[in-house]
Image (cartoon, rainbow, N blue to C red):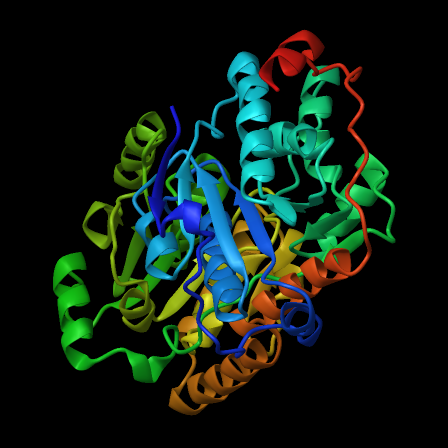
Amino acid sequence: MVSITGLNIATGMSKMMKTWDSASLTFRRFVEQNHAPVILQVVPALNSGGVEQGVIDINAAIVRAGGKSIVVSSGGLRAHEITKAGGVHIEMPVHSKNPLVMAANVGRLRKLIRDMNVDIVHACSRAPAWSAGRAVAGTQARYVTSCHAAHKLGGMLKRAYNAAIAKGERVIAVSHFLADYLEQNYKVDPNVLRVVHRGVAIEKFHPNSVTPDRLIRASQMMRIPEGAAVVMLPARISRIKGHMFLLDAIAALGKKDLFCLFVGSDIGNEAYRKELEEYIAAKGLGSASRIITNCDDMPAAYMISTVVVCPSLVPEGFGRVPIEAQAMGRPVIATDHGGTRETILRDETGWLVAPGDVDALTRALHEAISLDARGRAMLATRGMAHVAHHFTNEQMCESTLDVYAELLGTGAGVKALPSNDSFSISEADRAAG
């Protein structure tokens, strides 16, 4: 049921790197004056996605700062990146929403916390938070949660399930939009809220990092027509991402030299993909668009794009695509809600349009595609500088370690979470640990 990969966990993960490039001063001071803190992150799985990328980045930063990092997940294609960076990965079914499995995870996590002398537990999603919050009770570990999306409130059970992410001693929101959402809907004390924007690895997402060979390979893989202006929507194939909204705007624009790329996984959304293909055909855009479900070189994909569009129909908690696109010097258009309002400087580094407003999106597309070389260069310079000043991976890691350092310096662990909420299974919970 539980498997471990990485360093020998019995030896306490003694191998540590001693560089401090993305460590907060307070975290570094704690390491130097006390001990190497053990930080446990819990995430459903380690595949693609912004949450997963954040966990992988923070794992590496903890190790670089002299701490000890453990990540618990159900596994995934990127689990090896945890061990490669010097952390320990422990496989556990923390992705499950089955109440009995979630209750059993309480005991598994509590044993791990005690056996490994974990200092801080950081739950990065709702199901793990439900188990981790209870597992921390009765231990000396401190507790952090992070919120990455404005989940629908739903009924009483759904609301109680969602509320698990708001129970940390510190609650990290990845945008001010989400901080407001947590404060308004879950009454989170603003004194425990911390806004930590996501970051991009600018050494990876930078025009100079992409070689000509990679550009050629990406163009061939995506079969870009010669001389076409490329409009790219990088997002999973899901209705809420606004693929049809973009197709409506492209059809309205009426330009024959446009090529639209939808880049993202369709796993779990195969029925919607079929519907999307039918919509493409109905719009007469079959020869001017393509769906790519697997791209292993996103920096190169950005570089072959003329404009990047993020037309999500629902507010994104943060959204990595706009900052990645700006870091690559690409014009970016996004819908005017959620976290994108905090990442794009309106009419300076990109365009913001009302969700579902086809006319506004059509106008923005026309402006972006019509930029001359000087206009594109100026926009690229502003976008790259904006990301470098506000949204780097180093800034994200440093701010997160700052949150850990706050709790490391403030004494004993948290009190037990109440077990009488509408989603708890008190008998199963006690039996689990």
Residue 292 versus residue 128: which sits nearer the camera?
128
Position above or below: 313 against 330: above
Decide if residue 362 is in sight here.
no
Residue 371, x across and y down, in percent: 43, 81
- Quadrant where the image shows the N terminus: top left
Which residue is most to the bottom?
A: 374
Name the residue located 68 percent from the left edge and 29 percent from the top edge. 162
Query: Position of 168 compared to 48: left or right?
Result: right
Residue 272 falls in image quadrant: top left
Which residue is most to the front?
A: 11
- Quadrant where the image shows the C terminus: top right
Position above or below: 378 against 429: below
Name the residue located 17 percent from the left edge and 66 percent from the top edge. 219
Residue 353 versus residue 168: which sits nearer the camera?
168
Position above or below: 134 against 315: above
Residue 423 falls in image quadrant: top right
Residue 383 versus residue 6: which sits nearer the camera?
6
Decide if residue 202 is in sight here.
yes
